[in-house]
């Protein structure tokens, strides 16, 4: 293709100008793999007869059986050119899995540690509240002796546990905001600040923590004030 030596004349039309036909324009094309940071750029497409490529990639979207479609494509290509090779045929799911294969082990490991952390958090909340109930058994006995109901004691202990859980969720949300750029490179198809995902995680954590808080709170309602005050 002719290129003028003067950059100022790049758009100048003269006898050496070569006209090309544009057959397609795409606003955004993702150049990197699925797990990498997206690098979206615009793109335009020319007819293969104008700029003959060394290799050609064809994507076919179909609801039929892929093996049957491949046989039909091979038959049509054979009619056009019997010597034309057709290789590296894979489903889009296979391309996706290959793109994410390098990070799959890290994702599984992160999921495992996340489940372990969730379990340890629940055990920790239960342990702390059970210890608090034990330490405050005399206070709880006095409250019951002065007329406090089991519901009031349950609400008191549960409220303190939920306060701890709420502080933890707020700190976790702040950490997510601070690390959102790092988290964004580790997930595919999700935003690090996706409100649906964050809300679901907080709901699961809150439900488990609520259960861990309810057990010591229920235990506190069974404190015998006579036994506690005579110690």
Image (spheres, rainbow, N blue to C red):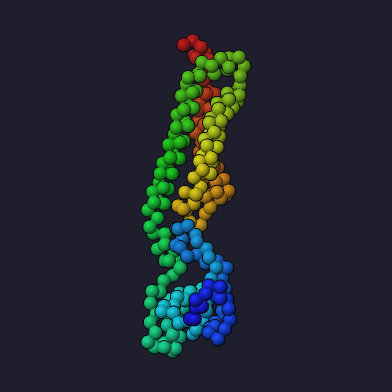
What residue is drawn where x is 37% and y is 53%? 105
Q: Residue furthest front?
A: 6
Where is residue 48 shown, x and y percent of the image? 49, 82
Whether residue 53 is visible here, answered yes or no, is: yes
At 55% from the left and 49% from the top, the residue drawn is: 193
- Looking at the picture, how far across and down is residue 159, in whole percent? 58, 29
Q: How many labels, in total?
A: 0
Return the residue nearer the eye: 205 or 168: 168
Vertical order, 216 against 93 (above or below) = above
Q: Can I make out residue 211 in this image?
A: no
- Give the residue displayed 62% in from the left and 16% down from the top: 147
Query: Does residue 15 lie above or below 134 as drawn?
Result: below
Give the residue displayed 47% in from the left and 19% down from the top.
135
- Where residue 217 appears, as percent x and y from the top left, is 53, 27
Q: Position of residue 169 (x, y in %)?
A: 53, 38
Relative to 105, residue 69 above or below: below
Height in image: 116 above or below 15?
above
């Amino acid at each position: 293709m002719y290129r003028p030596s003067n950059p100022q004349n790049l758009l100048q039309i003269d006898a050496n100008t070569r006209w090309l036909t544009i057959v397609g324009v795409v606003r955004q094309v993702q150049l990197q793999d699925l797990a990498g940071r997206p690098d979206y750029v615009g793109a335009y497409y020319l007819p293969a007869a104008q700029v003959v490529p060394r290799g050609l990639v064809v994507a076919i979207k179909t609801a039929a059986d892929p093996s049957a479609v491949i046989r039909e494509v091979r038959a049509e290509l054979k009619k056009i050119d019997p010597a034309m090779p057709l290789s590296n045929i894979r489903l889009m799911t296979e391309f996706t899995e290959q793109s994410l294969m390098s990070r799959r082990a890290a994702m599984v490991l992160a999921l495992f540690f996340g489940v372990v952390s969730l379990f340890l958090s629940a055990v920790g909340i239960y342990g702390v509240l059970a210890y608090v109930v034990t330490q405050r058994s005399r206070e709880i006995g006095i409250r019951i002796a002065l007329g406090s109901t089991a519901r009031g004691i349950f609400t008191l202990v549960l409220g303190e546990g939920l306060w701890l859980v709420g502080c933890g969720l707020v700190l976790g949300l702040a950490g997510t905001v601070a690390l959102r750029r790092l988290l964004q490179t580790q997930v595919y198809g999700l935003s690090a600040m996706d409100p649906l995902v964050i809300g679901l995680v907080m709901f699961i954590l809150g439900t488990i923590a609520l259960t861990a808080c309810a057990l010591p709170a229920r235990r506190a309602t069974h404190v015998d004030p006579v036994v506690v005050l005579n110690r």
